[in-house]
Amino acid sequence: MSAAPATATRPSVPESGVEETDVTEDASPEETPAASPTSPALPPAVATTPAASPTREGDTKAYAFGDIEIRLTPNELGVYTAVHIPNPSQKPMSFSFTVRVTGPQGYEVMMKRFFPHVLPGDTGREAGLLIDEDEAPVPADPTVEIVAFEQTGA
C-alpha cells in the first residue's frame, strides 16, 4: 500500500449512475435478447442505487450503493478507502468509477479507478489512503458519494 497523495479537486462532473434500461416484464432472462458489448442498450450488471445509512464496524463506515460497497476508515494521515464492485452478470465487464470522499473543514479527495476485465462472479477491488493535497484536517466521520460510474462489456 502506498501513501501517495490523491489529488484534491472540485470537478464539474455531474453525478451519474448506471443508465437504466427497460426490460420486457413478461420475458424470462433466457428470452431477453443479449446486447453486444459495445451496445448502449447493455443491461446494467451492477446496481448503483443511492446509499442507505452506512453501517459501522469500529472506526470503519461501510456504504452500500446497490451492489457497490465502499468502506471508509479515517486515520492520522487520511482516509483509507476500499471500493468493491462485483460482476453478477454472465459475461466479463469493465468498470470505471470516481468517488468523492468529504468531511468538514474542506476535506475533499477524489478517487478515480478503472477495472478493465472483471470476470463473471468476481469482484473488482481497489483500496488506497486518500490524503487531501490542501492539508485539510482528516475527518473523523467522512462521507462518500459516487460521482461517476460506467460499465461496459469487456
Image: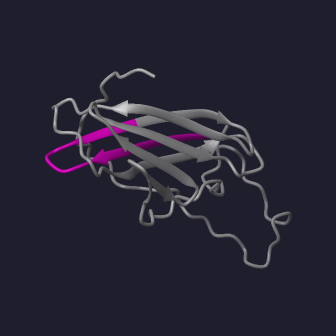
Which residues lie in the magenta part?
94-111
**Which residue ends up furthest to the bottom in the rendered image?**
26
Name the residue rendered at 18%, 51% in the picture: 104
Q: Is residue 10 left or right of residue 70?
A: left
Magenta-drawn stretch contains 53: no
Colouring mode (rainbow / by chain / secondary structure / one colour): one colour
**Which residue ends up furthest to the right in the rendered image?**
30
Which quarter of the figure is the C terminus placed in?
top right
**Eyeballing the image, is 27 above or below 120?**
below
Magenta-drawn stretch contains 106: yes
Name the residue rendered at 45%, 66% in the picture: 52
Q: Position of residue 33 (x, y in %)?
A: 79, 60
Q: Is residue 66 left or right of residue 117?
A: left
Q: Position of residue 78 (x, y in %)?
A: 29, 34
- Residue nearer the viewer, 141 or 118: 141
Q: Position of residue 127 (x, y in %)?
A: 47, 34
**Which residue ends up furthest to the front in the rendered image?**
58
Name the residue rendered at 61%, 44% in the picture: 152
Number of marks present in the image shown: 0
Q: Position of residue 14 (x, y in %)?
A: 33, 53
Q: Main secondary structure of the magenta part?
A: strand
Q: Is residue 134 left or right of residue 55?
A: left
Name the residue rendered at 56%, 41% in the picture: 95
